Amino acid sequence: MVDKYKEYALISIVSIISVLLIFKYFNLNPLLPLNYSGDALVHYNFAKNIQVSGWWTSNPYLGAPGVQSLNDFPLTELLHILLLKTLILFGLNWYQSVNIFYILSFPLTAVISMYAMRRIGIKTAIAFPLSLIYTFIPYHFYRGVNHLFLAAYYTVPISILSAYLLASEKKLKPVETVVFPFVIASAGGYYTYFSLVFLGLGIIIKFIKTRKLFELKPGVIFLSLTLLIFMLNMSPTLIFQLRHGSNLNTGTRLISETELYGLKIIQLLLPVEDHNLSILNKVYKRYGQHGLGLTITENQYSSLGLISSVGFLLLLAYAAFGVFIEKADKNFIAKINIFSIFNLTAVLFGTIGGFSLFLSSYMTPVFRSVNRISIFIAFFSLVALGLLIQKYVKDRYAIVLVFVMLSVSLYDQISIGVMRNFRDDQKGFLALKNYAYQLEGIAGKDSMIYTLPYGHYPEGEDKKIMRLALLTDSIKWSAGAETWRAISYWQYNNTRLEIERFLENIIKEGFTGLVIHPEGYDQAKVEEIKRILSDEGFKSYNDEFVYFDLKKYAEANNINKDPTKVFYYIGGKCVHDYTDLNKVITKYWCVDSARINFENRTSRTLKYNVNATLQFPAGIEDFSLTVEVKPGYSTKYIYKAAEHDGAFPLPGNEIKWPLNIGYPNMLLQNVIVTEVPDV
């Protein structure tokens, strides 16, 4: 039994030692955040939430005066979340757990890749180095902790193995039939999406080969089980939105973005950024220096590296010209056929203007970054190389060849450019951590701190403020509120007020401090706040943040705590015109109806007046309604525009209009909600 698994133990050890040596070479400390900026902060937020509340969706110390809820963002990466939670249960803190998760993704990828290659029929001596090449592909480092769950592509070989077995004469083992659908469906939306394409393709290949419908039964069951588990992973978000309504003002993707973030063949084949060989570095830079930089997005992360590129080109050559078939046995031809079909399908599906655009245009554009299919292409390519070497190179030469390929690939695939999504800023992080510690002492336990500028997490300025908020354990922060739900809308309305009225409002709500990120906020307003508070503030390292104590100001101006009773926001099929440029809502574009969602925090029913201006294609109407708002969550329709004829053209490109909701037929403006005083 020990001998059976020693190769897996060995490749795990080799991959862990290798990644730690790479970290050492680039001066990265795995005990500190590997990148404390950008999207990495979102993953650290997930881990902090698990540490604080037990699950990734909620944190009582963020989103004040409410509680951070991330239920609007469907996260189907249950497998990864459970691994993060396990690491935290073992005593790691939130940022250490993210770092160790990332490090563990290397041995997991190596082990599972080698298992998949062996099941496909590649000998261990060849599968071992090829699996390491796949493990240390540029994609793994480009994604880093910024795209932590994309970097955890250790599930991709399982998807490809499953698709191959469904297409071939081999059969899935009973344990694989049970475990693999869960793994595929719990690895994140993109990888599940691509996996379903290849699983379906595997079933089609099997039918074309056998012409027997009953042969498709195992594949259909496997595919259906995968879809079912995926929907179960989606169910928390679906249930939340069923109760509270969908949120069309967050996370909307456009059809055009499928083109922007599509796959480009040249980027599969180009050398990595800042390649270790200067001549190859010049090849890369030439591509970006002649107007092509405008089309370079995250699709640059799809670089296969030299070795995988060879396999990719050979698969394309086979698909086009049928090479390798001379003196080849049927088993070999069958395998190459399957992987050449998979490879060609991936290119046709993912490339700019490819078949994925049909799905984006007529179903949903939510999976816009189809360049991410490159990690599937990389595995197809390495499997093809393994099969070819095993077939045409004698064993003693084959082993030498693949280990030479491994050495070349490590030099080719890892460069300072590939590692640019990691940040060696240990001094800055430790200084910020010390500032957070001091802030907790100054602000006091269980204090509430409001943050500026206003953001719509996880896309806006809030993400930068999270650098500080995540480092405290006893302060409640306004940052991280659920985008464009009740608390976020209340925060937005506060930012529209004059400074003195703004300060009065947040103090009444219970906030005792104010933190500003000056880089993203109007400097004139910062100076005005300093003048009003007669305080220069407590500044952090490099003046990244400045803290103002509000307690003295509240006492001097006799401002007492008087929390908001009812929060509200506009919901239904309504999209507002707020953008990062104008930073103001002037109207809502609505389809058929609009509704107002209330969150009553008291224990009694309250009355509110709702006034608004409604514009229809035929004219403008004033609207007024008195509603009874019960404790908890409730919804009231403002108007049903379907009673009017006509529709407006779709709003301009600056507004992300969701697909498949129809045309707007009502504009909602000047919404004012006021409490009716008790008589």
Image: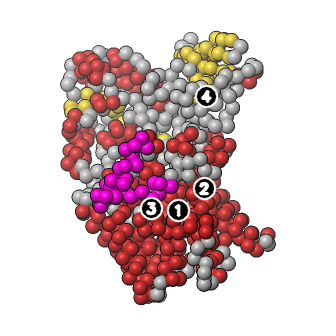
**Residue 574, numbered circle:** 4
Q: What residue did someone put label 2 on?
A: 348
Point out the tag, 2 or 3, that comes first from the N-terminus: 3
| Marks 2 and 4, the one that precedes in the sequence | 2
Asked if marks 2 and 3 touch (Cβ < 8 Å), the reply is no
User: Label 4 vs label 1: CA separation?
Assistant: 38 Å
Query: N-terminal of the two: label 1 or label 2?
Result: 2
Of tags 1 and 2, which is closer to the observer? 2
Q: Amino acid at mark 1?
A: Phe
Amino acid type shown at disc 4:
Cys
Query: Circle 1 sits in a helix, a strand or a loop, which is it?
Result: helix
Q: Residue at x 59, y 26 (%)?
A: 651
In the picture shown, does residue 195 fall above or below 112? Answer: above
Describe residue 259's horizontal placement relative to residue 299 as left or right.
Answer: right
Residue bounds of the magenta highlight: 265-293
Q: Report the amino acid beneath label 3.
A: Leu
Q: Quadrant of residue 594?
A: top right
Q: Nearer the viewer, residue 7 or 185?
A: 7
State the colouring used for the structure image: secondary structure
Whether residues under marks 4 and 3 lie with C-beta atoms below 8 angstroms apart, the answer is: no
Q: Nearer the viewer, mark 3 or mark 1?
A: 3
Residue 304 is marked as 3
